Image (tube, rainbow, N blue to C red):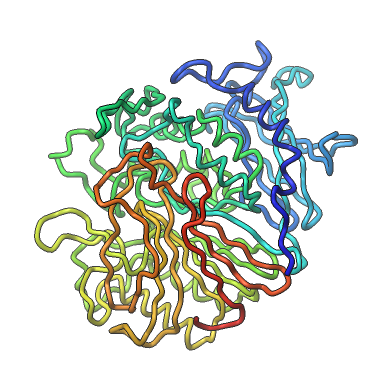
Amino acid sequence: MSHRPLPGRRSVLRGSLAASAALTLPTALGAAPAFARSGRPSAGWGVQTGDVTSHSGLVWVRSDRPARMIVETSATESFRNPRRWHGPLLGRDTDFTGTTRLRGLPPGEQVHYRVLLADPDDPRRTGEPVPGTFRTVPVRRREGVRFVWSGDLAGQGWGINPDLGGYRIYDAMGALDPDFFLCSGDSIYADGPIQETAALPDGSTWRNVTTEEKSKVAETLAEFRGNFRYNLLDENLRRFNAQVPSIIQWDDHEVRNNWYPGQVIADTDSRYTEKSVDVLTARARRAFAEYYPISTLRPGAREGRVHRVLRQGPLLDVFVLDMRTYRNANSPGTEKVDPQGILGREQLEWLKRELSRSRAVWKVIAADMPLGLVVPDGGEGKPNIEAIAQGDPGAPLGRELQIAELLRFVKHRRITGTVWLTADVHHTSAQHYQPSRAAFTDFEPFWEFVSGPLNAGAFPASALDATFGPERVFVKAPTASNVSPAEGYQFFGEVEIDGDSAEMTVRLREQDGTVLFTKVLQPGRVGQ
């Protein structure tokens, strides 16, 4: 079987990338990154790539002032005879962020790039170049695929702790040399202020890097932008971004906990002066589009969408869902008819169409919320439901109806190789869904794997809903709520698809990379 050796192809780059990260390390808690060249534009927030294909990729950067974005690419680190790409003018309208699409790249090759920021009035005056690398998607099956996934960053008040070395989990993910990172949502906690300190159960003190924008819930566009900048203060994350492309989706905390369209915040929540969730969502969506390289969103554009399919060669298609933008209001979930559901009709039909068109061996459905785990939305007695499962083990009701329709479609169209990946619930687990255990039986067996958090409070395992017959084969979770990252319980998952056999190996890992659970799936099957 063909497996890429570890350490991988990027190991030779880490010295230069680490040096670049050290150059831009914040000089003090909450301080902006230091300028590399005084009086010239600086890219102190690092670089990112996203939605990489066989022949293209999006490169992201943020400047500290107006600047022209320039990207140079090369097949080697020497940058001999580089290819130059002239990007946008970065200004205040996008918070000095911008992306440049690189086209016409060779498939399955390592691309070295560096971003330069030029003075708009004097193109000869450029800041210190910031290097990065990514690998374009292969067109040959034998090269295999490896990626990691997780979600939930800086939640429940647990931010960048310099005493613990910051977001160390990114170094463990980067050490696996993945082709890309799938962020399953909650990439920020706009509703979660970060205080300087927090008391820990053992009497010690958790210490956070803090900023002004993270001192309260985000309401203004500037505050949402500040939430995205906050995470980029972490050296581990900046280094990871420079060597691993990302596929980003969003969930609730990019706006506010458990939000849905049309929601009005209760007057009892005095943290918010802006009560319209739709207004907050528009601001959050704009900042989200500015701070991530996403092929279907453009900074400042009113149109665009988060849901999309990223084709990763003959072995893999990734179907990125948006379980926020089109959902109906949270309710107890007992409706016998629910055409809107959690995806909305248009997105559901898009997903069916794209799944039926896919010729990839594996179809990963990237969901920002789990299927069979009960996620309540507060309240006493029978609360509203935040996700899909509502705790009734009988026939599908509420949002379960839409999922039942999708699972039935996959079965009857004989679509092979579907695997569900998600985060959200702040523990890690593996669920196998089986019709023989279910109230709804018109589907083929499938697996759902849960990971996260990256750096947030950990929570006990969620209850299972038997409607689709899940069996929890593995779980690791604390028994208490909001356990800090200092106590562990931070997780990510790894998926490796072998280029010869096309077997998919899923590993659930701890913060330091320790493997907790492994499952090998066979290709070409409708269900397993």
Residue 469, horizontal then vertical, whole percent: 33, 79
Image height of 288 relative to 520, above or below: above
What residue is shown at x 61% (from left), y 29% (from top)?
90
Compared to 275, does 363 lie above or below? below
Residue depicted at 35% across the width and 74% down the height:
471
Which residue: 75% across, 55% down?
A: 55
* Screen quadrant of the N terminus: bottom right
Q: Seen from this angle, which residue lies furthest right? A: 81
- Viewer-nearest residue: 42 or 119: 42
Residue 361 picture quarter = bottom right
Farthest residue to the left: give it.
381
Q: Residue furthest top?
A: 38
Q: Position of residue 166 (x, y in %)?
A: 47, 31
- Residue at 50% over, 51% down: 183
Q: Is residue 444 left or right of residue 181?
A: left
Against 288, residue 206 (above or below) is above
Residues 251 and 391: in front is: 391
Q: Is residue 426 left or right of residue 289?
A: left
Q: Tell me residue 424's x, y (percent).
A: 37, 54
| Horizontal relation, residue 496 to residue 233: left or right | right
Choose between 504 and 214: the one closer to the eye.
504
In this rendering, position of residue 376 left or right of residue 247: left
Query: How many numbered circles does the render carry?
Result: 0
The percent coordinates of residue 77 (x first, y second) are 81, 36
